[in-house]
Amino acid sequence: MGELVAILSGKGGTGKTSVCAGISIALAAGGKKVLCIDCDVGLRNLDISLGLTDCAPLSFLDVTEGGYHLNQATQHPLFPSLYFLTAPMNRSAEQIELLAFSEMLQKARREFDYILLDAPAGVDAGFRLAAVPADRCILVTGAGPAAVRDAARVGEILELMEKKDVRLIVNRVDREMFAYLQLTVDDIMDTAGLPLLGIVPEDPNVIFAAACARPVAKFKKRTAAVKAYQRIANRIQGLPEPITLR
């Protein structure tokens, strides 16, 4: 059975969606069959980070309500074992039928190794759409105090939801800023109260790749962010990987 992984953040602008895309591509490049689902209803943009803006992907509502099957999800042209369902634009998150969505995810478990759910920032209905069914929750934060405070609050909410496997990714880490502020990743972990899954360094190639509508792994190979996504993907699979900025 496949694993449901929710990618969450308390605050917007943490780079959650680019992290979701990067991990998904790393898993697929390693031979895993992966389904990405954009759960940011009405404000979808996961297709940009995946490099799928020229496609016309099905939404998850097309599967839950429109009679389409999961095997009709958009297949990535560069990573054949990666599939994608976008978020609908004609509904609010509050209008999504949770039972039908849950049933779709249970079917996806039988067809995919990993199903990654890219939730909107915050803790509203879209957050719960992704977090409630998840086996594993990955909370993406920046290093700034507001982002870390919001991450801590989301961690508390996930604890109340009785989520047991919650890990932290610190994204867009800038060595010079950390040195100037005399800040460490351990400080962020202590504030957020969550164990660390990985660190992703600041990498302008992520922004450049999105501007070119290409996945960063194909825009420029082996950049700092791409290597970090691969390390995180390995740790998700239970493989030993050091936590490093290199």
Image (cartoon, rainbow, N blue to C red):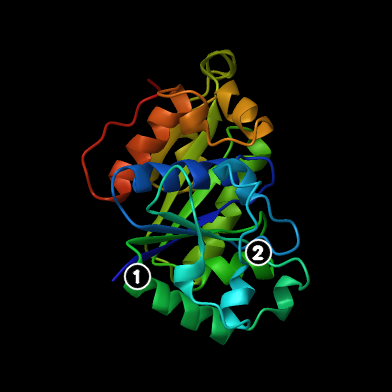
Residue 150 in sight from this viewpoint:
no
Instruction: Classify 10 Å Cα crowding around label 1: few (below 14), some (14-19), many (20 and above).
Output: some
- From the image, tell me which residue sits under label 2: 87
Residue 79 image point, x, y percent: 41, 45
**CA distance for labels 2 and 1:** 20 Å
- Where is residue 1, by image quadrant? bottom left
Secondary element type, mark 2: loop
Q: Is residue 45 left or right of residue 168?
A: right
User: As shown in the figure, which amino acid type bears the numbered disc 2?
Assistant: Ala
Q: Quadrant of the C terminus?
A: top left
- From the image, tell me which residue sits under label 1: 111
User: As shown in the figure, which amino acid type bears the numbered disc 1?
Assistant: Glu
Residue 129 in sight from this viewpoint:
yes
Residue at 73% x, 80% y: name it: 95
Residue at 66% x, 54% y: name it: 121
Residue 69 image point, x, y percent: 49, 76
* Marks 2,1: beta carbons within 8 A: no
User: Is 27 situated above or below 126?
Assistant: above
Farthest residue in the left direction?
A: 240
Residue at 51% x, 72% y: name it: 132
